[in-house]
Image: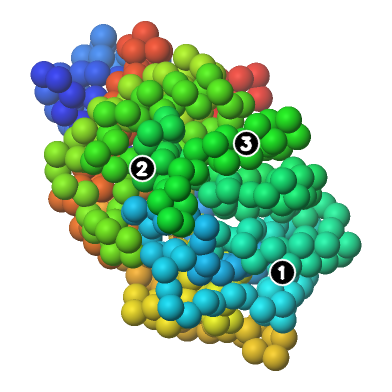
């Protein structure tokens, strides 16, 4: 059974992730539960009544397995547009904008990928299709292709959802176009003005704050669905909550994602140091409380007790992601098939307008994802974090890494908050007249 005892203050949080159930208890209660699990009856009426009343022994939620590689039919087209960028973020995972050779996606592979996902969406009982612009640079700099892809998709499938990840440094014309045509925008912005300008300067070291705030105002005015993603460095970790308060007061963003940096310098992945991991976790929780007070969803990707999944990320099975060199990859951050770390992520290519899957390569990737997840069985985040993001795991090891330290501590603190809100018990599955409701 999915049961974990998580040290908390001088007691433990008893946690059943598949029942979204958590409460605080002592070592005696843990032993009692383990005895019952082993089939040895405890016979303590008071404890039995409590465990029954919270549904402790009831079956948990089921977790759908990942599809087999040969059955994968992605319905989301992800276009990795260009390695050019108008910012020079100090922590950029891709060293965006600095490459000697400009790489840009061509129309032919972009169209092939769009056609494939629209066909898959039609074949698989009309699943919602999507088109996303991403990249190892700023996708809106490859504007001609972006406009062409949007027009093509709107013509072929008006219901297709269109979105992008962007730094928000747009001209007036681009802003108007995005507000008119996009269903969702994920906008990177690091909080208060001083932090944004220090961490996300534009080329030549100029500030980016005003330009991004103008774009946010445009999104608000156009009532576009958007979320903000903040990246935190050791130098800015004390200003995370101020950043969230600022965004709550000055924007209508419904979601604010906060992530600790995973690079040590531009283009170099690295794990988090222990003291930064701890500082991030405590400042994140303060920011989370500020978000709750302002009715916003503040989250960090690894700590999500509300999720039960077979993998950290479903991009390998839901997205058809194409690089400027026309490779199909399983991750939005692998922006070129020529990167030294790209090989395990490459699962096909587009040639002469045809999408060619490499099924054995995808099978190997999914098997490795699963192997890594299984190595996390003992972790109470197993059902939510599932072994972490495939790119981050290159620089982290289960349990002992800085990233795991953050994920586990934030999850533990979230559970403690839910328990406090629930007067001693978090029961995330409710009884309704129709049965149980997650
Ligand atoms: S993080 Fe994004 S916006 Fe910043 S330099 Fe890299 S690609 Fe450009
Ligand atoms: S593997 Fe990680 S970085 Fe890549 S798309 Fe998934 S969540 Fe994003
Ligand atoms: S051990 Fe680390 S990677 Fe594995 S589930 Fe736990 S937090 Fe995630």
Q: Nearer the viewer, mark 2 or mark 1?
A: 2
Q: Residue 433 or 211: which is nearer the viewer?
A: 211
Q: Residue at x 65, y 32 (%)?
A: 217
- Which residue, given by chain and number where applicable, does mark 3 sit on? 214
Q: Residue at x 24, y 46 (%)?
A: 404
Residue 280 position in % (x across, y down): 26, 35
Give the quadrant of ligand 2. Answer: bottom left
Instruction: Using residue 87 as the reference point, say whether residue 178 is left or right of it.
Output: right
Asked whether residue 432 appears in the rendered view, the answer is yes
- Name the quarter where the C terminus is drawn: top right
Q: Are marks 2 and 1 in contact (CB under 8 Å)?
A: no
Label 1 element class? helix
Q: Residue 173 or 224: which is nearer the viewer?
A: 173
Instruction: Using residue 241 as the reference point, say whether residue 36 is left or right of it.
Output: left
> Where 255 sits versus 112, above or below?
above
Q: Are marks 3 and 1 in contact (CB under 8 Å)?
A: no
- Which residue, given by chain and number where applicable, does mark 2 sit on? 198
Marked residue nearer the N-terminal end (2 or 3): 2
Q: Residue at x 25, y 14 (%)?
A: 47
- Which residue, given by chain and number where applicable, does mark 1 sit on? 145
Q: Residue at x 44, y 26 (%)?
A: 244
Marked residue nearer the N-terminal end (3 or 1): 1
Label 3, label 1: how far apart the Cα atoms are: 24 Å
Which residue is situated farthest in the bottom direction here?
Answer: 352
Instruction: Using residue 420 as the reference point, say whether residue 189 is left or right of it.
Output: right
């Amino acid at each position: 059974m999915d049961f974990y005892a998580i040290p908390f203050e001088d007691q433990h949080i008893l946690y059943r992730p598949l029942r979204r159930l958590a409460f605080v208890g002592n070592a005696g209660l843990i032993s009692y539960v383990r005895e019952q699990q082993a089939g040895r009856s405890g016979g303590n009426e008071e404890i039995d009544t409590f465990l029954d009343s919270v549904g402790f022994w009831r079956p948990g939620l089921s977790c759908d397995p990942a599809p087999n590689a040969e059955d994968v039919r992605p319905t989301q087209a992800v276009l990795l547009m260009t390695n050019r960028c108008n910012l020079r973020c100090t922590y950029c995972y891709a060293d965006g904008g600095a490459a000697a050779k400009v790489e840009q996606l061509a129309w032919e592979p972009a169209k092939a990928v769009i056609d494939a996902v629209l066909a898959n969406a039609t074949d698989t009982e009309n699943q919602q299709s999507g088109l996303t612009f991403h990249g190892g640079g700023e996708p809106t700099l490859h504007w001609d292709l972006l406009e062409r892809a949007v027009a093509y998709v709107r013509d072929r499938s008006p219901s297709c959802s269109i979105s992008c990840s962007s730094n928000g440094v747009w001209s007036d014309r681009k802003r108007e176009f995005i507000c008119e045509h996009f269903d969702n925008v994920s906008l990177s912005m690091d909080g208060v003005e001083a932090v944004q300008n220090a961490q996300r300067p534009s080329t030549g070291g100029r500030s980016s704050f005003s330009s991004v705030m103008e774009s946010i105002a445009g999104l608000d005015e156009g009532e576009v669905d958007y979320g903000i993603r903040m990246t935190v460095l050791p130098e800015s970790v004390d200003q995370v909550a101020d950043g969230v308060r600022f965004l709550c007061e000055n924007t209508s963003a419904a979601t604010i994602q906060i992530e600790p940096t995973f690079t040590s310098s531009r283009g170099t992945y690295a794990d988090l140091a222990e003291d930064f991991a701890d500082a991030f976790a405590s400042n994140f929780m303060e920011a989370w409380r500020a978000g709750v007070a302002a009715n916003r969803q503040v989250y960090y990707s690894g700590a999500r007790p509300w999720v039960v999944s077979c993998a950290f990320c479903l991009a390998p099975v839901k997205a058809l992601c194409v690089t400027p060199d026309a490779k199909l990859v399983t991750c939005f951050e692998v922006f070129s098939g020529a990167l030294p770390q790209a090989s395990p992520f490459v699962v096909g290519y587009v040639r002469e307008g045809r999408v060619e899957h490499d099924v054995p390569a995808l099978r190997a990737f999914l098997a490795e994802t699963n192997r890594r997840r299984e190595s996390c069985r003992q972790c109470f985040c197993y059902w939510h974090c599932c072994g972490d993001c495939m790119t981050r795991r290159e620089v982290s090891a289960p349990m002992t890494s800085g990233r795991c330290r953050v994920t586990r501590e934030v999850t533990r603190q979230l559970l403690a908050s839910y328990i406090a809100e629930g007067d001693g018990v978090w029961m995330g599955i409710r009884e309704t007249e129709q049965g149980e409701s997650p």
